[in-house]
Image (cartoon, grey):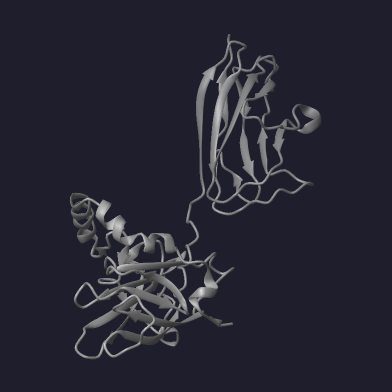
Amino acid sequence: MKKTFTSSFLGLAISGLLLASCSQMASYENEDLALEQARADKEGFTLSPFGSVIGLNLKEYIECEDRTVDDCITDDPITWYVQSTTSSFTSNQGDITVEIFNTPTHLNYSFTSSTGDKIKKVTINDVDIYASNQPSAEPLIHSVPLGEYNVDWFACDEVTDKIEVKRVNSSGIGDGQYLLFNTSYDLLPVCEVPEEECTLSFDKKFIEIDEDGYYIYEFHFTSDTEILDDENSWEVQLTVPQISGFKALDGRTYKGEGEDDENVLRWDGQIDACVPYTFKLGFLPNCSLNDEDGKKVKKAIIVSTFNVKSKGNRLGGPISIDCPE
């Protein structure tokens, strides 16, 4: 549901930055400003003396009812939409332009005058954000925190403001000294982050034979979907038909082994989508077994399958070890 409120309701303005604008401008070296502006020009926007983006080359504001799903913003300034309002003093005293745009975290106001020296007092919703006998450095930036998107504010929430601008720092509203105008801005939504796409992948890697004679292997697996942990079942199962022992070298607990457990190793645990998992185990071949003819086996099959729940056997072929003569 669309809400309507003033910017004063959104949060406290960063008034310290604004009230110190003249002194801060003086401390901002011309060389630094030129360097930052050169960088900004490459990106297609203009910087204020504080390094803030103002709405010269931003997208043109679109009313809420005219927006599509593609009209949204990110942290990238090229996605921001600016609403520009210009009002004129009487007696040929020039113009004041306020540009309003929101980022994912702030609602921003940028004030400029046609002659560059007309802003001595700015009031928004009866709160002074700048008041001095010296003209403000321009653009005068006013920033209001929005909070968290879809929690503190929502797409198309309307922010209405009463804005007063004076050429003199006084309470007077005489001819050519005072402007009063109202603005209405519907907040642009934050773009949804697309779900990460990934593919099902698996590979195995022989590492070494350790000092105890264990053959160390790593199995690398990435799932394209989430596999939930089922307390009554396993998520990964290795068939190990001809081993006499194993080592878990990845910090996991594996259950089963030997004839009573059908020569399998099982691991229970959740597997998240798009997250690479490494299973590292050591296998001790059992070369004391006999083949069908009663002779000692020449090869010991230490792993014949690597099954992942709902993904099947990923191994592709058994891992065999040559037994000594």
The N terminus lies in which quarter of the figure? bottom right
Say if 7 sits above or below 197 in the image.
below
Residue placed furthest toward the top: 325
Q: Hey, which quadrant is residue 277 in on the image?
A: top right
Say if 225 sits above or below 96 in the image.
above
Residue at the spot 32% in from the left edge and 89% down from the top edge: 174
Q: Where residue 4 sits: x, y (%)? A: 54, 83
Left or right position of 186 against 172: right
Left or right position of 262 against 82: right
Task: In this rendered view, identify the residue nearer to me: 47 or 73.
Answer: 47
Q: Hey, which quadrant is residue 268 in on the image?
A: top right
Residue at the spot 47% in from the left edge and 62% down from the top edge: 194
Instruction: Answer yes or no: is residue 154 visible.
Output: no
Say if 134 sits above or below 256 in the image.
below
Q: Hey, which quadrant is residue 179 in on the image?
A: bottom left
Left or right position of 144 against 270: left
Residue placed furthest toward the right: 260
Instruction: Answer yes or no: is residue 308 visible.
Output: yes
